[in-house]
Image (cartoon, coloured by chain):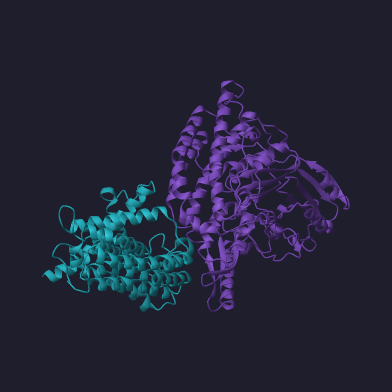
Chain colours: A cyan, B purple
Amino acid sequence: MEFLFNIYIFPGILFILTWAVFVFWFFRKILATLHKRVGPHYNGYAGTMQTFYDFSKLLTKESITPKGVNSYLFSSIPLIAPMLAIIPVVFIPWMPNFVIINSSYGVLGLVVLIGIEPFLLFLTGFGSNNKYSFLGGIRILTQMISMETSFFLSALSPALLFSTMNLTEIADMSSWLSTLILLPGAMLFFVSILGILEQPPFNIPDAEQEIVYGFYTEYSGTNYFLLKLAEFAEFLVTFAAMVTLFFGGYHGLFFDGFICLFVKMLIFAVLMIAIRASNPRLRLSQMLEFAWRYLVPLNLLNIVWILYAKQFILGD
Amino acid sequence: MENIKELFEPFNTQYMELYKENWLKVKLESSSDLLDVARVIKNYGIRSIATVSPTDFIEDNIFEMNYFFEDLNTYKNVWLKVDIPREFSECKIDSITPLFAGANWHEREAHSMYGVHFINHPDLSWFIISADYYGKFPFRKGFDWKAHEQNLIENMNTIVDDLYDEHNANDEKFDGSKTILNWGPTHPASGPIRLKVEVDGEEILAIEPDIGYVWRALEHLVEEKDFLGSIVALERICFMDNTNSMICYAQAVEEIAGKEITDFAKMMRVLLGEIGRIVSHLMGIGGFFNTMGLMTLFMWAIDLREYFLDVLENYSGARVATASIEPGGVRYPLNMKTLELLDVAIEEYERTKDDFYNIFLKNPLMKSRATKVGIITKDEVHDFSLCGIVARASGVKTDIRLDEPYAAYDKIDMDYMIEENGAAKNRLDVLFKEIAQSISILKQASSDLRDGIKSQIYNPQKDHLVKIPKKLPAGEAISRVEWSRGELMMHLVTQEKATSPYRLKIKAPSFNHTMILEHLLKGQTLSDIPLVFGSLYICQGDLDR
C-alpha cells in the first residue's frame, strides 16, 4: 500500500504533476511582476488554474509527427525523458525519516540521473529531421559536456566535506558553519544547474531568436507536454538536490519538515527567474570559454578549499 | 557650391540650378555621360547616394532618372537628372554600383519596378516583387493592377512554384555540413523579412536578404489617392514612428503649392515629431535586448511608451496611426490638456530612466556580446550611404534636423549625438542618448508653445492649418526629415492641375541598412544574426514600402 502511495501520490506522479502546474504558474507570475505585467489572471484565484488548462489543452491536442523522421525515435524520447527525470526523487529525503531509497550512493545516483537527461534531449533534436532542431541538439551536447564537468565537481564538495554520499546523512550533518564552508560550492552548483536546465543566460540550445525553438521545434501536443513535464521534473530534482546538498534539506529554523525544503526550493526558483529577467543570453563560444576557463578551475579550487576546511576548520 | 558647379563644366547639361540651400540640381544632356559624371563627383568627395529613382513620363515616352548624391561631411549635395528612352529594348543606362556601393539595391529596385536595365550591375535579379510580378514592371504607368489581381489563383501558384524551384535548387547545390538556413519570414525574431543564411554548422558563409514580404506598393498607392488622403498611406510606412513620415510628405506638398505654414504649426510638428521619435526609440531599445532573449526592457519600455501614446491620443484621437499632420500644418487645434499629459509622460520618463540605464545599459553580459560585433567604420557609412543612428554610432555627424533644419528645428537648441566605435552596443548608446535629447527638445517645444499661447503670439484654435488648394501646379520637390531610423527622403512630382501625386519616391533608411548586413555578418556565428540585425534598427515596413 505504501509502495503504491509512493508511486502514484508522493513523491510520485501526482506530486510531480502538481509541482509542474504550480511552478509553471509561479514562474509566470514572478516573471510578470518583474516585467511590470499581470501574468495569468482570469482562470482561478490569481490565474492559478491557467497552467492546468494549458497542460490539459496540450494533452488533448494532436501530436504531429513530421514526414521523413524515424517515428520510433521521435515518439519514444518524450516517453523516456520524463520517466528518467522523475527517478531521482527516490534518493531525496523529502521530510524527516522519509526517503524511498536510503542509499549510501545517493549523491552519485542523483548526479548521474540528472546528467543523463540532456543526452535524451539531444536525441530529440537529432531525430526531428529539421535544421533548427539539429542545431539545437548539437548545441545542447556542447553545453552539457562543458557544464556537467562543473556540475559533478561541485556536487562532490558536500560529499567530501561530510565523508558520505548518503543524502540523509548530509542533510542531518549540515550546520551553519558547514553551510558557510559550502557556500562557494553552492554558488558554483547553482551556475552549473542554470547551464544544465538551459536557463538564461545559458538558454543557448533553445535560443528562440536564433534557432526558433531548438530541439523542441517539431514537437506538439502530447509529446510536447511530456517533454515539458520532463523539464519541470528536472527543475524539481535539481532544486531539491541543491537544497539537500548545500542548505540542510528539510531542516528549518524552527521546525523540520517538507515545508522547509519547499520554501528553500522556491527561493532558488525566484533567484533563477530574477537572473532570467535581467540578463541576456550568451553566445555559444562565450559559454564554452566561461565553462572551461573559469568554472572548472574555480571548482577545482573549491575542492581544495573544502579539503582544507575539513582538515583545519571542522577539525575532523 | 561653386566648386561643385565647376565639376560639370566638361559635360553637356540642359540646366544647372541651385535648389534650396544645399542642393545643386543638374540635368545631363546624354545618359552616356553618367558614368564619367559619377566618377568626377566621387573623386570630388561626394561619396554617398541616397537613392536612384526613375520617373515615368508616359506622354513624352521617356524615363527621367534621378540620382541623389549626398555628402555627409559638408552637406552639399547633388541632384542629377538624365533622360532615357522608355521602350524596353532601349531603356538602358550605365550602372553606378561599381562606384557607389550604396546604389546596388536601389538600382535593382528600379529594374524590378520599371524595367530599367543597368549595364554592368553585379546582380540585377528580381527584388521586392513576388514571382507573379516578374517581368511585368508594376510601377510603369499603364500597368493594369486590377487585371493582375483577377488571376489570383494563378499568381499564388506562380509564387509557390518559385519557392519549390528555389528549394530544390538549394538541395542540389549543397551537401555535407553546408546548408541554407532560412532566418524568416516566419521566425520568432525576424519579422517579415527572410535572410537566406548559408551556414557551415554555426558559422555564416553568406547572407542574402530576401525582402518584399510586406510590400504594399505605397509609392503607387498614393497615386490613386488625393493629396490629403495620401497621409494615411504614408503614415503607415512604419507604425513605430508615424508622425515624421507625414511631416516629410506634407513639406513636399507645401513646397509645390508655394505655401508657408504658421510658426505655431511648425512648433507643433517639432512636438509631434519628437513624440513619434521617442515612441519608436523606446521600442528600439527593447527590441535590441529582445534579440538576446531578454524581454524585460521591452516590457518596461512599452509601459513608458504608453504615457507618450496618451499624448498622441489626446491630440489626435488615435494612439498609433494618428494621421495628425497634413499638408498645411497640423490637423487639429491644440488644447492645453495635451501639454499637461506631455508633462506627465516626461515626469514618468525622469522617474524610470535611471533604472533603464543602470540595469540594462551597464549589463556586463550585454557588453561582452555587443561591443565586438557589427562594427561599421566611418568609410563604410559613406560608401553604403548609411544614415540616422547607424551613421551617428560610427562617429559621422549627420542629422537632417541640424544639416537642413525643417519645421521649427532652427529654434531648438540641440547637438549631434555621436559615438565613436560603430559596434552594436554604440548604436544602443545612441538610442539612449537620443531619447534624452528628444525629451529636452520636447521641453523646449512645450515651453515655447506655452509662452506663445500666453502672450497670444500663437492662436492654438486657428493657427494650426493654412489652406492648401486641392489642385496643385506642375512641379517637383524633394523633402527630407530625420526619421527615427534615419534620413527619410521623398521626391514628389506633380502635373498641372493635379489632384494626386504623379510620382512619389520614398527613400527609406532601412533599405540601405539591410544592404550592409551581409558585409557585417560574414564569418560570424548564427548567434550574432539577431543581435546585429536588431542593432541596425530595421523596420520591415520602410524596407519594402
Instruction: From the top left corner, tell me how far across and down residue A87 is, in percent.
Output: 24, 71
Q: Residue at x 12, y 69 (%)?
A: A2
Left or right: B302 with respect to A32? Answer: right
B108 or A277, nearer to the observer: A277
Instruction: From the top left corner, tell me how far across and down residue A41 is, in percent.
Output: 31, 48
Q: Residue at x 54, y 42 (%)?
A: B435
The answer to whether residue A226 is above or below residue B419 is: below
Instruction: From the top left corner, tell me how far across and down residue B515 is, in percent.
Output: 63, 59
Q: Is residue B369 visible?
A: yes
Left or right: B307 with respect to A298? Answer: right
Quadrant where the N terminus of chain B is found in the figure = top right
Q: Picture quarter containing residue B348?
A: top left
The residue positioned farthest toward the top in the image shown: B455
The answer to whether residue A161 is above or below residue B450 is: below
B183 or B469, nearer to the observer: B183
Left or right: A160 with respect to B274? Answer: left
Tag count: 0
Q: Is residue B184 visible?
A: no
A254 or B320, nearer to the observer: A254
Q: Picture quarter containing residue B438?
A: top right
Q: Residue at x 45, y 46 (%)?
A: B358
The residue positioned farthest toward the left in the image shown: A1
A236 or B112, nearer to the observer: A236
Q: Picture quarter containing residue B327?
A: top right
The answer to whether residue B343 is above or below residue A53 is: above
Instruction: From the top left corner, tell me how far across and down residue B390 is, in percent.
Output: 61, 51
